[in-house]
Image (tube, rainbow, N blue to C red):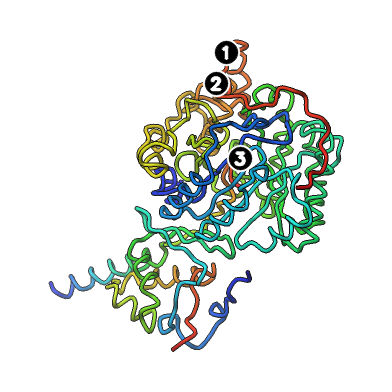
Amino acid sequence: MPSAQAESTQLQSVALGDRALELAPRVALRPEQFGALAYHYGTRRLVFLKDRQLVCVVEALASHPSLDATFDACAVDVRRRPAFERAIAGLIESEMIRERADD
Amino acid sequence: MQEQETLENESCEGDEQAELVEELLIEEISIDGMCGVY
Amino acid sequence: MSALTTELKRGLDAPICLTWELTYACNLACIHCLSSSGRRDPRELTTDEAKVLVDELRRMQVFYVNIGGGEPTIRRDFFEIVDYCVDGGVGVKFSTNGAFIDAAMARRLASTDYLDVQISLDGIDAATNDAVRGDGSYAVARRAMDHLADAGFGPFKISLVVTRQNVDQLDGFKQLADSYGAQLRVTRLRPSGRGADTWHELHPTNEQQRQIYRWLLAHGEDVLTGDSFFHLNALGEPLPGLNLCGAGRVVCLIDPIGDVYACPFVIHDEFLAGNVREAGGFGRIWRESELFLSLREPEAAGACASCGSYDACQGGCMAAKFFTGLPLDGPDPECVGGDGELALVGVSPGSAPRPAADHSKPVRPSPVTFVRR
């Protein structure tokens, strides 16, 4: 089964924080003590998420209109947001997260 | 006094900021690298 | 040591994946077989017991199972179990000698969601391969590969165990894999199962280990190794991969009768964590067994403490040490510094632990023919 196109990794005028995102359909997110493991059943790729608040953000993405709104909802300290954005960008690169079709 | 504190606080936050951006919160694993695993 | 490896060594809440040997029955009698397979054990898990296990793995969110044996496709319920896994969201990768993969089976495999296939091969020609795996086994494996290719299966894996006799064929193996669009898997020989008796003649020499290391450095990004060569990291730049032993921490083995071992290379009471038929099933064993909890304790360097390479090689493989009669807190028998070879001199003949059970067929097998169901 072909993996989702990583269109969202291309440079666009919309900032990452403003994008509506979601976990890719074939991804399983499994909580662990340290954070979570994300496994993509299509690509067989496995990513280790090292922060529990990051996991909360990833789980909440689909219920919020934008990444920034998700950060707000999960009470992510503004000083941590650049690191969280880098992580989200990395998860988009690994095809674990994608832009939502709606909105 | 107050001015001094503010300056100190700003530089601390600056260092923390650099540290926090540097921190990598995800890591991809190549799991096909485990014995007895195919 | 990265935060990742530190966490993995502490043990995960559930395995990422695990090896599940479905049966000890096998149509082959490879001279290095890690599970000494041949004859079915009458205590094998039933189809229903297998499904109960799959239900549990699903609840634990084990991402996929690595099905092997023996020859797993010998089980009449092979597809029933595979389909039950895949339908329940547990991926399946399986290892086979290819004897039962005819055109029809290849098409069925091609149409199954999340299923990866690995064909075992130990030589790029019949002479080299069949010396280890039996007369006709090379032809059978190649025919299975052809059927998979014809059925449009997509990339499958070719897996070899590196021996003294095939180490010069690594380039040939890569070419063979490339010709099928397949991925090559190169793994380390352990003195486990029937390998206990053949290890001394089959395992690569010191010079050949260096050859393997150089080859993996050059090709490591394209080739899988099962992370089985991290003992070679003492030679220099670390090889690609996690470079840690995941036994009891990230992965484990469930054998055909439901016994749970730290890994497929240590099928022995010393590394038996429990049986899935016990109350609490697999989950309790993974989370609470004495063996697995002890494997999750920080390792002691022991006799290797004064060696500068310990951080790189981590003392090597516990299966390799155990079945050659070496202490677990000392050098690997193939330690690149030669310390293992030295230690082996002190092991009295016949004193090394013997594999748990021998499922080998008593009679020398007749030449392998292609089997049609």
Q: Which mark is residue C228?
A: 3
The secondary element bearing badge 1 is classed as: loop
Residue type, numbered disc 1: Ser
Which chain's residue wears label 2?
C
Q: Quadrant of residue C36?
A: top right
The secondary element bearing badge 3 is classed as: loop
Percent x, y of residue C348: 59, 10
Q: Tell me if label 1 and label 2 are in contact, CB under 8 Å.
A: no
| Residue at the image point whose x is 55% and y is 58% from the top | C86
**Dots 2 and 3 on the same chain:** yes
Residue type, numbered disc 2: Leu
Q: Spatial distance from mark 1 to mark 2, Cα to Cα?
A: 10 Å
Q: Residue furthest top?
A: C348
The mark nearer the N terminus, 1 or 3, is: 3
Against C60, is C39 above or below?
above
Which chain's residue wears label 3?
C
Classify residue C358 as left or right of residue C214.
left
Q: Which residue is mark 1?
A: C351
Question: As rendered, which of A33 and C298 lies closer to the eye?
Answer: A33
Q: Quadrant of residue C32?
A: top right
Residue type, numbered disc 3: Ser
| Residue at the image point whose x is 63% and y is 71% from the top | A2
The mark nearer the N terminus, 2 or 3, is: 3
Crowding at mark 2 (Cα within 10 Å: few <14, some 14-19, many 20+): many
Q: Residue furthest left?
A: B1
Crowding at mark 1 (Cα within 10 Å: few <14, some 14-19, many 20+): few
Q: Tell me if label 1 and label 3 are in contact, CB under 8 Å.
A: no
Q: Which residue is mark 2?
A: C326
Which chain's residue wears label 1?
C
Question: As rendered, which of C167 and C331 lies closer to the eye?
Answer: C167
Percent x, y of residue A69: 33, 81
